Image: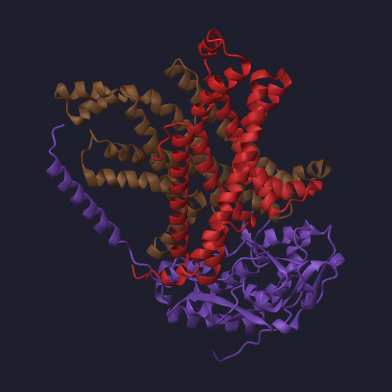
Amino acid sequence: MWSTLRDEAPRFFGYYNLLFIGEAFLHTLALSYLGALLGFVIGFALALFRHPRLFPILPLRLFAIAYVEVFRRIPFLVKLMCVFFAFQIAGWRGSMFTVALTTVVLSAAAFAAEIVRGGFDAVHRAQWDAAEAMNMGRADTLWRVVLPQSWPVILPPAFGYTIGFVKSTSIASQIGVLELTYVAKVLNTRGFSALICFGTILLLYFAICWPTKLLGERIERRLTTRVRPVAEPMMA
Amino acid sequence: MNYTFQYGQVVQYIPYLLGGAWLSLQLAAISFVAGAAIGLVNATALSFGPRPARIAVRAYVTFFLNTPLLVQIFFIFFVLPEAGILLEPYTACAIGMSLNAGAYLTEIERAGFQSLRRSELDAAQSLGFNLRQTVWYVILPHIVKALYPPLSNQFIIQVMTTSIAAIFAVEELTGRTYNVNAITFRSLEIFSVAAVIYVLLTLIVSTALALVGRRVFRVKAKVF
Amino acid sequence: MPIDRRTAFRAGLAGAAGAAILASTTREAAARPLDDVVRSNELRVGVNPTLPPRALFNDRNQIDGFEPEVAAAIARKLGVRLNLIAVGSPDRIPQVAAGRIDFVMGAMSRTSDRAKVIDFTVPVHSENYGIVAPAAKNLTTLDQLNNANVTLAQVRGTTAIPYIQRRVPNARVLLLDNYPDRNRAMAQGRADASFDGIDAVRVALRPFNQVQWQITPVAEYGVTYSCLGVAKNNSSLKDWLSLALYELHMDGTIERSWTKWFDGPMATKVPASPFF
């Protein structure tokens, strides 16, 4: 096994393969980081809609609750296939990358909404009451009272959440998105050993996730005195 | 949109899909129990083990938490046979999922043990409890209360994670959904039915776990 | 909070209604007739690069193979640019039906079931079926396969599966996602054999040359014909493609390309028929 590895390594790490793997690496990064970022924006809005004090609008609240509950309870692979076929039926001519990105954004929104909600819940009732008593508007309450206290609670889990999506995007290989896992499968089919193909991408995934996790822990240490591991939200 | 949804063709396959959901639950349960055992050993090693054991456990947890489960199973499924270890698809997925869950559960269980405070043990001592009584009346109730909610959460994650096994020819809920899709071509219909089954399945499991937690362990676990 | 509940409720309803209207005015899916393809100066063809040598990733990791070569010849005849789009087995038919690609290749055997969903041109090539197994297993007849101790590795959604269920009901079937996984399953010993198209296996199994393979044609299944799959009722494109294929058969382009990629001539010839 190890001798094959030594024999095929020069050919495996040839110019065209490195180009191919590099492109896939960038796609994995873009898919997960961009998806998590866009999802966070939507999730933030959902958390606002869900909050009884910020948006006392029942239909919006019910929508936000239903959205979060449903999208957190469907496996990524099943969501991906649903989005994929929905795109086809609606006639949107997006690429497979767009399909995967949409899936990441839709799921990320649900998880982000939960993280942000946790941040809002960390602000004591009395603070909300005080803001209301001082006749502060919603935007003011949010901006000057709630958010400054919520960020330290929201930010650390947001890193774990991003790592979760880096890992989930490996499933996008199922619909032929040119990301790391897909490339490993292609190179494996071309005859390179499974060890070198999957071993290489495992290291590359690690190279994305591990620094992200360390950064998250560092920021958490700075924001709070207590050290907790970066928690990852419920996802699959 | 001129697509007409035809759930009629799909309805007849629902019992078949529910059978798959049962398999998903089994796979989730197996990998959860195995993962919890791995986590227990690891958490103990982290607290009381010698330095090499602690380093090994940390390396294991760091590696498995920072790489995708799908690729981990690819490794077990395609690389191990090159070394002469050939596992059935179901076994390969169960092992991959257990090792993966083991890493998460190591973190969860360690946090649970660490939440035990010195003062509680001191209190037990001052009440004249012996070791058995201390474990039974102080340590265990505390750990169960601390661990029950995150463990329930992890079990739900395991249920959803089983869908990855479909990629390895295991015919659990998602695998069976692929099969029905190949027969009927009613793709969105069948996958949306599967999505609904997952939502209901995890809701039922969450509710059941919350009820058990409340009745048996007096833990206030929330469903939502 | 300076917003009273009733106004808020109304605002919410209005928002929901707005979202619903937005969602219902999505662009309609439509296949592109011949004129549109020419006008856009681009022919979009779906190929499955996990099916070497029909389509594959070459040494430079670009899509290449028999089908891309034929597609390129067709695009040249039409005078437009070729855009190859990678499709997988489960989605290739929906992709055409939705108009994301103009036609699909990828071993599209013509079957009456598929013809309910898409239209077919004249055949591009024949598909010949048989049993593939490691020679050591010595599995050469369907009756040998019809045994509970035999595991067949097959690919989901392929035409051979209903036949297997009927003809060799006792065999265990391992349903995999794609052909590379099937080949690996046999090479690694997860399965004993596979009953499927055998035209491509000689080339596709080359990476697994540590195993001695045995390929046995089975005439009983019959021959199927792979065509270009076109969206339903897109007759302007379909008719033109059939004519183009006639010319490519006539001048030997298809047979030449086949011989080059499949490492031998087509097992059952496709005569160039002037009528279709």
**What colour-coding does the image apply?**
by chain
Q: Colour of chain B?
A: red
Q: Colour of chain C?
A: purple
Say if A148 sits above or below B201 in the image. Answer: above
Q: Answer with left or right where residue A111 lies relative to residue C181.
A: left
Q: Answer with left or right where residue B147 lies relative to residue B59.
A: left
Residue, x 41% and y 67% (percent of image)?
C40
Relative depth, front residue between A228 and A197? A228
Relative depth, front residue between B141 and A198? B141
Residue, x 43% and y 71% (percent of image)?
C37
Q: Colour of chain A?
A: brown
Q: Residue A113 occupies which quadrant of the picture?
A: top left
Residue, x 47% and y 52% (percent of image)?
B198
- Residue B8 % position (x, y): 42, 72
The quarter of the rendered structure image containing the N terminus of chain C is top left
Say if A234 sits above or below C254 in the image. Answer: above
- Residue B175 % position (x, y): 57, 59
- Residue C102 % position (x, y): 47, 70
Q: Answer with left or right where residue A210 lies relative to residue A38.
A: right
Outermost residue on the bottom side: it is C275
Q: Answer with left or right where residue A71 lies relative to residue C15.
A: right
Say if B112 sits above or below A74 in the image. Answer: above
Observer able to see residue A207: no
The quarter of the rendered structure image containing the C terminus of chain C is bottom right
Relative depth, front residue between C179 and B224? B224
